[in-house]
Amino acid sequence: MAGADELARVPLFASLGDAERRELASGFAVRTAESGSRLVGEGAPGYLFFILVEGTATVTSHGATLRELGPGDFFGEIAIIAGGRRTASVTATSHVKLLVMSANGFRELQEAWPDVAAKIEETMRARTP
């Protein structure tokens, strides 16, 4: 389980108070991966939402680099919200520490914290054509 202190360092959750971050943290698992590890694969079903808390990763689609991710960035929301498959691959470019939430947990987040959900959806719209 993630800690509220980790969520406090994520800009997405800046509007939440300590008690809210503690409640939200219970929905996240902590995972690590090494450089070169594929975190999500383009075209795969998407049932997890990720927040990068340490390290870096690259987002690619059809072999082209779309963006670099660093601490505080998130990914995986498009497949959950749109109900489809992953639109890109994400590969760790260093050792990474991730907070991972299931699709069910993500839907609970959307209901409990609509301001956070709105920020996620705004980012999603910017990422999709």
Image (cartoon, grey):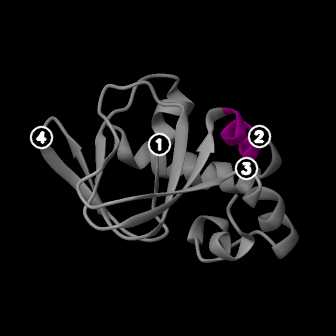
Dot 1 or dot 3: first in sequence order is 3
Dot 3 or dot 2: first in sequence order is 3
Dot 4 or dot 1: first in sequence order is 4
- Residue depicted at x 66% and y 66%: 13
Residue at the farthest left position: 63
Within 10 Å of disc 4 (Cα), the crowding (few <14, some 14-19, many 20+) is few
Query: How far, Cα to Cα, is label 4 from label 3?
Result: 33 Å
Query: How far, Cα to Cα, is label 2 from label 4?
Result: 34 Å
Span highlighted in magenta in the image: 104-110
Q: Is residue 30 magenta?
A: no
Residue pointed to by mark 3: 27
Residue pointed to by mark 1: 76
- Residue depicted at x 63% and y 38%: 102
Look at the numbered discs 3 and 2 and tell me whether their residues touch, using CB distance below 8 Å: yes
Instruction: Name the quadrant containing residue 43.
Output: top left
Look at the numbered discs 4 and 1 and tell me whether their residues touch, using CB distance below 8 Å: no
Question: What is the secondary structure assignment of the residue under circle 1?
Answer: loop
Instruction: Name the quadrant containing residue 9.
Output: bottom right
The residue type indicated by label 3 comes to Gly
Residue pointed to by mark 2: 108
The residue type indicated by label 1 comes to Gly
The residue type indicated by label 4 comes to Gly
Q: Is residue 33 above or below residue 105?
A: below
Look at the numbered discs 2 and 4 and tell me whether their residues touch, using CB distance below 8 Å: no
Q: Quadrant of the C terminus?
A: top left
